[in-house]
């Protein structure tokens, strides 16, 4: 968890490794992952998403481009892509203390409180972010909304999500692109010790 409320997911050196881990997490049978054929696929490295990459992120991205190209894919580096900026979400649902505590209480084996959870978090910026908002997002406590207000907010967010998805689809279709290729993090993440 971070001030941007990122959610970590399974990571591995190969897609096959991640598929095995995902199957174990969700309790599904293990399956053999067959690598996709790269020939005929077109990837795009958006110009406007890589302007300020640190050297490590740029090296990793260049290595991925080299591997995809060696596998027969086409990688374009001549397109800009900004639908997320055009359709930036105006508000973000934030788990209130009440909602998060309800989630904790719904799991029989958990006996902690929200404050205890935040106190144990190694990332010092999480508590103020959680309590006060930040990162340009408007924090919305859904627990304080009536059913009608909550339904209207959800409908607004779903409409905006649909617009973002349509912008992606239009970009892919009009440029003959199958997927975007971007770094997970454009700059090296700060060390926890550096936060005050």
Image: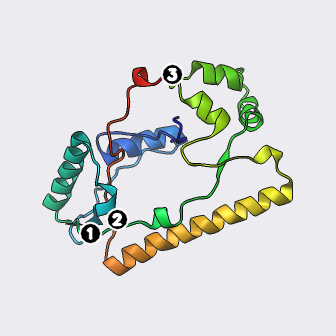
Question: Which sits earlier in the primary sequence, circle 2 or circle 3?
Answer: 3
| Residue 42 position in % (x across, y down) | 26, 69
- Asked which secondary structure carries label 2, the reply is strand
Label 3 crowding class (10 Å Cα cut-off): few <14, some 14-19, many 20+? few
User: Among all residues in the image, which is located at the extreme left?
Assistant: 70
In the rendered image, the vertical position of residue 141 relative to residue 178, given as above or below: above
- Asked which secondary structure carries label 3, the reply is loop
| Residue 119 position in % (x across, y down) | 61, 19
- Circle 2 sits on which residue? 179
- Circle 3 sits on which residue? 122
Label 1 crowding class (10 Å Cα cut-off): few <14, some 14-19, many 20+? some
- Gap between marks 2 and 3 measured at Cα: 35 Å
Look at discs 2 and 3 and give the one toward the viewer. 3
Q: Quadrant of residue 182?
A: bottom left
Q: Between 39 and 68, which is closer to the camera in this rendering?
A: 68
- Give me the residue at 76% from left, 29% from top: 105
- Give me the residue at 82% from left, 45% from top: 144
- Circle 1 sits on which residue? 41
Question: Which sits earlier in the primary sequence, circle 3 or circle 1?
Answer: 1
| Residue 39 position in % (x across, y down) | 20, 68
């Amino acid at each position: 968890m971070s001030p941007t409320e990122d959610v970590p997911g399974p990571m591995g050196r190969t897609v096959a490794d991640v598929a095995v881990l995902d199957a174990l997490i969700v309790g599904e049978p293990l399956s053999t992952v067959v690598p996709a054929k790269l020939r005929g696929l077109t990837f795009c490295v958006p110009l406007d998403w890589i302007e300020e990459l640190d050297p490590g992120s740029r090296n990793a991205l260049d290595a991925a481009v080299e591997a995809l190209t060696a596998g027969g894919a086409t990688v374009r580096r001549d397109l800009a892509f900004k639908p997320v900026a055009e359709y930036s979400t105006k508000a973000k649902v934030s788990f209130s203390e009440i909602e998060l505590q309800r989630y904790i209480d719904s799991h029989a084996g958990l006996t902690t409180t929200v404050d205890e959870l935040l106190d144990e978090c190694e990332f010092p910026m999480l508590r103020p972010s959680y309590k006060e908002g930040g990162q340009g997002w408007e924090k919305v406590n859904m627990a304080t909304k009536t059913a009608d207000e909550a339904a209207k907010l959800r409908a607004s967010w779903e409409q905006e999500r649909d617009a973002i998805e349509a912008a992606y689809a239009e970009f892919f279709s009009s440029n003959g692109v199958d997927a975007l290729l971007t770094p997970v993090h454009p700059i090296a993440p700060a060390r926890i010790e550096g936060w005050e």
